[in-house]
Image (tube, grey):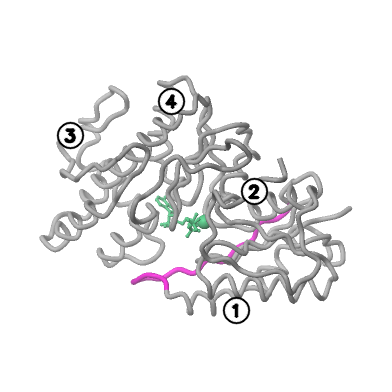
């Protein structure tokens, strides 16, 4: 039996997963850098990855019940991401590949966030990729993942993380903002919730600028408004709740346009922000109204993880895309989703 290893290290998370030849995920272990206050500092994240790597690796093999001699190839997420983090992951993968005499498959992290959707049954979807650094509406056309729309400034996750940081909350901010929003809704507006389209009552909402241009979105205007609201002492729960309503509605509108434009009948939600239950709910409502199918992988496959890297890496390896000459393996911190020739389909 042959196995492939998936290694993720592009940003906050160091992850290792083991998959079998059929693409079944046998283990998916990770350790993520977090803070109580303040954002992430790339060199500290690199130190984090270096420290946790041996433990995460051992645990991944142990849980999968394999020995390292059974590894056939290493899928490494070598692009895009924060250079110090990418370098640490590459050093780890190269040391291991050299020791075991196996090749490395260089995997684009963003494409891996998209392709893992195939594991939950999506065949030809419009993909709403909502993560930390990226926010894109993508669909497969003409041999590539084409970006139909994207953020004109910040990625939605980074935007949410910045708001959380301004509130004195730590990293990652997404789950904490969601918690604040849920608590605010429970206390303030639950009883006034309108049944139509699952929309929330207007009364608890702050007015924030809604910015969709075609299939592109922008967050910088709302970011300034929110900074001012925080300075004025506005209730954090109300801010979190109002912000989620506006920014997720923007994303869903962009995704709906892409569905209409491409004529596709499936929506796949992916990336770490896809963990948000309100975003999932809004996507489901939109899909129901359009008669489209909705797909979203489990939480463990949404926020950065080794399994999605191994999953795409295996497809690439089987298609003959890998490198035995380790000196030719390098990082590409700025590689884009639409740079990738999809040669494995
Ligand atoms: P990219 O994939 O664009 O390179 P990344 O790898 O940093 O970015 P992911 O790991 O996919 O991003 O996602 C991390 C982001 O997801 C963080 O910004 C985090 O705040 C956000 N996030 C996690 N859980 C939630 C949630 N429940 N609600 C909103 N955001 C969330
Ligand atoms: Fe990611």
Quadrant containing the C terminus is top right
In the image: residue 58, left or right of residue 184: right
Which element type, helix, strand or loop, lies under badge 3?
loop
Residue 227 is situated, as x and y percent measured from the top left of the image, at 19, 60
Label 2: state its secondary structure.
Answer: loop
Q: Which mark is residue 111?
A: none
Q: Is residue 198 above or below residue 167?
A: above
Q: Mark 1 or mark 4: which comes first in sequence?
A: 1
Q: Mark 2 or mark 1, which has the lower sequence index?
A: 1
Tell which tag, 2 or 3, sits nearer the viewer. Answer: 2
Q: Quadrant of residue 286?
A: top left
**Direction from residue 278 to residue 80 in the image, left or right:** right
Placement of 141 over or under 323, stated as above or below: above
Q: Earlier in the sequence, mark 3 or mark 4?
A: 3
Q: Which residue position holds label 4?
A: 260
Instruction: Measure how far apart labels 2 and 1 are at the Cα level.
Output: 34 Å
Nearest to viewer (mark 4 / mark 2): 2
Q: In this rendering, which labeled residue sits more in front, label 1 or label 4? A: 4
Indicate the quadrant where residue 163 lies: bottom left
Query: Dot 3 corresponds to which residue?
Result: 202
**Whole-Å distance between the Cαs marked 1 and 4?**
47 Å
| Magenta part of the chain | 26-40
Q: Position of residue 199 (x, y in %)?
A: 28, 30
Q: Distance of mark 3 from mark 1, alpha carbons?
A: 48 Å
Residue designated by label 2: 341
- In the foreground, 108 or 59: 108
Q: Are marks 4 and 2 in contact (CB under 8 Å)?
A: no
Camera-side residue of 154 and 144: 144
- Residue 51's label in the rendered image is 1
């Amino acid at each position: 039996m042959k196995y492939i290893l998936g290694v993720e290290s592009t940003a906050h998370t160091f992850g290792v997963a083991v998959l079998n030849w059929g693409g079944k995920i046998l283990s998916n272990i990770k350790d993520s850098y977090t803070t109580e206050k303040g954002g992430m500092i790339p060199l500290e994240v690199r130190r984090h990855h270096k420290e946790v790597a041996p433990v995460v690796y051992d645990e991944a093999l142990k849980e999968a019940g394999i020995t390292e001699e059974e590894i056939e190839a290493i899928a490494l997420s070598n692009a895009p991401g924060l250079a110090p983090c990418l370098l640490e992951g590459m050093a780890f993968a190269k040391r291991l590949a050299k020791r075991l005499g196996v090749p490395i498959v260089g995997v684009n992290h963003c494409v891996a966030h998209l392709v893992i959707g195939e594991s939950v049954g999506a065949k030809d979807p419009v993909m709403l990729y909502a993560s930390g650094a990226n926010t894109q509406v993508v669909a497969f056309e003409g041999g590539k993942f084409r970006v139909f729309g994207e953020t004109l400034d910040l990625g939605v996750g980074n935007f949410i993380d910045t708001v959380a940081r301004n509130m004195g909350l730590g990293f990652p901010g997404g789950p904490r903002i969601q918690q604040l929003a849920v608590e605010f809704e429970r206390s303030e507006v639950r009883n006034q919730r309108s049944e139509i389209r699952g929309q929330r009552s207007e009364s608890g909402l702050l007015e924030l600028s809604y910015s969709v241009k075609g299939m592109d979105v922008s967050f910088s205007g709302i970011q300034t408004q929110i900074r001012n609201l925080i300075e004025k002492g506005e209730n954090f729960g109300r801010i979190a709740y109002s912000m989620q309503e506006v920014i997720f509605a923007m994303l869903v509108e962009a995704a709906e346009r892409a569905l209409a434009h491409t004529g596709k009948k499936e929506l796949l939600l992916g990336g770490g922000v896809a963990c948000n239950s309100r975003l999932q709910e809004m996507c489901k409502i939109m899909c129901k109204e359009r008669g489209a199918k909705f797909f979203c992988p489990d939480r463990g496959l949404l926020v950065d993880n080794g399994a999605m890297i191994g999953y795409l890496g295996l497809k690439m390896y089987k298609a003959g895309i890998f490198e035995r000459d380790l000196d030719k393996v390098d990082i590409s911190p700025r590689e884009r989703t639409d740079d990738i020739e999809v040669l494995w389909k």
